[in-house]
Image (cartoon, helix red, strand yellow):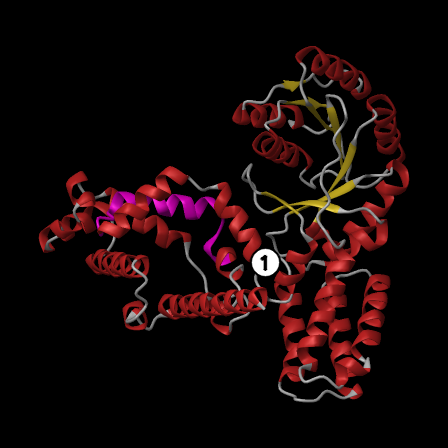
Amino acid sequence: MAFEGLSERLQKAFSGLRRKGKVTEADVRDTMREIRLALLEADVNFGVVKDFVKTVREQALGAEVLDSLTPAQQIIKIVNDELTKTMGEAAVPLNKSAKIPTVIMMAGLQGAGKTTTVGKLSKYLMETDNARPLLIAADVYRPAAIDQLKVIGEQLQVPVFDMGTDTDPVEIVRQGLAQAALQKNDYVLIDTAGRLQIDEQLMTELANIKALAHPDEILLVVDSMTGQAATDVAKGFNERLDITGVVLTKLDGDTRGGAALSIRQVTGKPIKFIGQGEKMDALDVFYPDRMANRILGMGDMLTLIDKAQKNYDEKQAQEVAEKIKENTFDFNDFLDQMDQVQNMGSMDEIMKMIPGLANNPAMKNFHVDPKDMAHQRAIVYSMTPAEREDPDLLNPSRRRRIAAGSGVPIMKVNQMIKQFNQAKKMMNQMYKGNFSGMEGLMGNGISGRLGKMAMNNMVRKQKKNKKKRLKAAKHFKS
């Protein structure tokens, strides 16, 4: 999981500070040494680490920090701010041409995920800008690259311009741009060739395409799993092409995070998107502040909200709310909700975005096995339509039939029905604003503990917001 090792090391570095009321210069030095080692272990560029630690140390040794009542919190804030600054301060939007089409040229080494990213970016533009993109297949060297782009185009219902593998890529781009002008496409995405390493032939070809197409964006697609090597690749491409931004792919893999923390500092160019997974909607805008929060184990509620809204069906949500209110939520609704949650990504990642859970020790071993969700789905599919709509019909003989039909032990069927009834009761109580008895309802297992923590955080947040509103109202009156 991206940044997991770095996050753990940084938390360990801060744990000693949190236990102390006052912090000495020696404490700060020890913490800085741990931070330095954590960053180097995460494969962050040495020069970036050196500058980062120097800046944080200078600010942390200030009298206003050492003499304050909460020095540990202030040092963590300094680290958070510096992480954000290192990665670029704020999200940087795509450049857009004053007149159509906006031309986006994709570059990168072979295997970095360029073709998949072309598809993801097309989908993103269609959803956020109501775009009508044209994809140009200019990678004539990699076997099946054109076919892969065509499959993606069919999947997204986006036109793909190609001239096979026997035409010069510059000519393909020339004719592709001419077609985009005729069709009045507002975006053109050029999928270029890559190599296993930077070479003169590749760079000359890309420079010729750039000279012809005058792209508004040259996005470098970088495999974040290559660590510090990704920074060297970005530097090399930037020197030859003057890239406008970076897309970091495979951030969901076993990556140490060094590329995300180094690229902006080394190239001066922003990371604009991050790719996490193979699905076409697995592309997110890169927010340095949110990423800093995640690295420090503070969660990422804003990204979680963005993901929820992307998969949010307002009409369906209203219908579910009514069913919860009337206590008629059934197994058909359960399947729909399961689909919406799965569309947001893995449960492990979702839970770690919630402040309070992200850095909780219980989360270290938290894992939702996709097989469990598949078993639950099989159990529901083995029910008759009447049983799905009325769970009260599920007597012992029906449960035995469902167990046989879904291929799971009767114990699993009983367990799921019990959890469903508990969740249904809990949601109904929460809808009515009744939080009493929630702890007993949630049980003592890992899911119960997580539920309790989430509930406690929600209640605390509500109380805190209420205090803020009252304080603001009092200030306004005065």
Query: In the structure shown, which secondary structural element does the residue marked by tag 1 occupy?
Result: loop
**What quarter of the picture does the C terminus occupy?**
bottom right
Which of the two residues, 197 or 173, is positioned nearer the viewer here?
A: 173
Q: Residue 360 at x, y = what percent?
A: 51, 71
Identify the residue at horizontal 89%, vertical 29% (top origin). 204
Residue 313 in sight here: yes
Q: Quadrant of residue 31?
A: bottom right
Task: Tell whether 365 sits left or right of 127.
Answer: left
Q: Quick one: which residue is furthest to the front in this view?
A: 478
> Within the magenta stretch, is there residue 467?
no
The chief SS type of the magenta part is helix
Q: Residue 156 at x, y = what percent?
A: 54, 27
Which of the two residues, 12 or 354, is positioned nearer the viewer here?
A: 354
Task: Tell whether 388 sits left or right of 65.
Answer: left
Which of the two residues, 160 or 73, is positioned nearer the viewer here?
A: 73
Mark 1 highlights which residue? Answer: 1
Which of the two residues, 433 or 35, is positioned nearer the viewer here?
A: 433
Q: Which residues are magenta?
A: 327-348
Identify the residue at horizontal 13%, vertical 52% (top origin). 392
Q: Quadrant of residue 178?
A: top right
